[in-house]
């Protein structure tokens, strides 16, 4: 899986989408809160694997945290990390399959990219991309030639789930 690049100066606003999610789906998009860290890490390991859990753990060691989560009351529905494996990288990210198609992934993506822009980044790399069309449509991202495997070249693969 290759990487994609996105221009943070041309991001769409997430305000309308986040408000719609909150009103219609009772979904809140927010930064991960350190007291929630172990619950979030458990969710990440269960849904994305051990390597993603390691990346997410790094995000909770930063202030402010570089992990956004989607919640409905006390249930975690998805997460998105940035500046985890390397600076200026978005990912890992995941939304529960039962919650896909509602805009939660897009909201997590845009909120994360907005935070990166606030930190002074002008462009961001979306690492190890799966759904290329989603990123193209959501934020105008485009493929970076010869970017595979990028910083993941020497990663230990501990289970098959992480390679999917």
Image: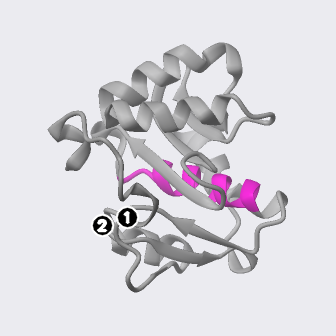
* Residue at x-position 19% and y-position 34%: 159
Q: Residue furthest bottom?
A: 145
Residue 161: horizontal and vertical position, in percent?
20, 39
Q: Which residue was labeled with disc 2?
A: 1
Dot 1 surroundings within 10 Å: few (below 14), some, or many (20 or more)?
Answer: some
Q: Residue furthest front?
A: 154
- Give the magenta range: 101-116
* Residue at x-position 45% and y-position 47%: 93
| CB under 8 Å between discs 1 and 2 | yes
Q: Seen in the image, is 60 located left or right of residue 97? A: right
Callout 2: helix, strand or loop? loop
Q: Does 109 lie within the magenta span?
A: yes
Picture quadrant where residue 153 is located:
bottom left
Q: Nearer the viewer, residue 35 or 52?
A: 52
Residue 98: horizontal and vertical position, in percent?
29, 38
* Residue 28 shows in the view: no
* Residue 12 shows in the view: yes
Q: Nearer the viewer, residue 73 or 149?
A: 149
Q: Seen in the image, is 67 located left or right of residue 116? A: left
Residue 14 has which mark? none
């Amino acid at each position: 899986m290759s990487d994609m690049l996105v221009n943070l100066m041309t991001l769409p606003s997430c305000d309308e989408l986040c408000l719609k999610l909150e009103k219609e789906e009772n979904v809140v998009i927010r930064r991960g809160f350190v007291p929630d860290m172990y619950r979030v890490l458990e969710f990440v390991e269960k849904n994305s694997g051990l390597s993603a859990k390691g990346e997410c753990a790094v995000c909770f060691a930063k202030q402010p945290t570089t992990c956004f989560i989607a919640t409905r009351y006390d249930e975690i529905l998805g997460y998105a990390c940035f500046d985890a494996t390397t600076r200026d990288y978005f990912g890992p990210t995941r939304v529960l399959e039962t919650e896909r198609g509602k805009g939660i992934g897009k909201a997590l993506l845009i909120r994360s990219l907005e935070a990166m822009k606030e930190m002074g980044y002008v462009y961001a790399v979306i690492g190890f991309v799966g759904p290329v069309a989603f990123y193209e449509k959501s934020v105008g991202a485009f493929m970076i030639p010869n970017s595979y495997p990028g910083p993941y070249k020497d990663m230990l693969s501990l289970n098959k789930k992480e390679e999917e």
